[in-house]
Image (tube, rainbow, N blue to C red):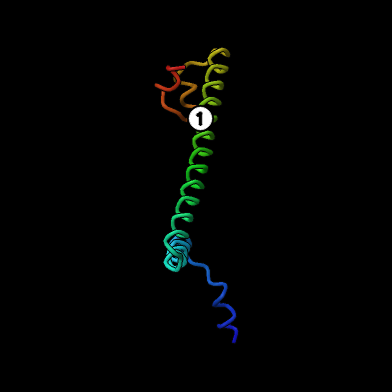
Amino acid sequence: MKNMERMGTIEFKNQEVFERLWNLSNCSMLSIEERRKYERSLKGYRDYVNQLDFAKAEGRAEERSFMISMLKKKGMSDEEIAYYLDIDIEEVKSV
């Protein structure tokens, strides 16, 4: 009986694969119109997530530029800044 109870709590190494399979099986039971609505909704969600990811990346780039400027004002060389921030020297030189 314990084995049966534990079966519901099995953790898979790649949960995403099983979630995709679950979504596909559920989608196959939808009507054409329901499937179109689902796909539009999914596209909207993915677009939103991509916009957030882009904004975060843009914010990090602005943060890095600010940090580079401040370190240059403190007298650090481009090479030191690149080393300590672990970034490409060309990025430091472009600021």
In the displayed orientation, state which residue is furthest to the left: 90
Q: Count the labels in the image.
A: 1
Q: Identify which residue, 3 or 47, lies in the foreground.
A: 47
Q: Identify which residue, 21 or 10, lies in the foreground.
A: 21
In the displayed orientation, state which residue is furthest to the front: 33
> Does 58 sit above or below residue 66?
below
Q: What residue would you read off at disc 1? A: 58
Q: Seen in the image, is 3 located left or right of residue 89?
A: right
| Element type at mark 1 | helix
Q: Residue at x 50, y 51 (%)?
A: 41
Which corner quadrant of the image does residue 35 belong to?
Answer: bottom left
Q: How dense is the environment of label 1, judged by Cα within 10 Å: few (below 14), some, or many (20 and up)?
A: few
Q: Residue at x 52, y 68 (%)?
A: 11
Location of residue 37 in the rendering, given as x and y in whole percent from the top left corner = 48, 54
Location of residue 56 in the rendering, given as x and y in whole percent from the top left corner = 54, 35
Location of residue 73 in the rendering, given as x and y in whole percent from the top left corner = 56, 12
Q: Residue at x 47, y 66 (%)?
A: 26
Location of residue 57 in the rendering, given as x and y in whole percent from the top left corner = 50, 33
Q: Quadrant of the N terminus?
A: bottom right
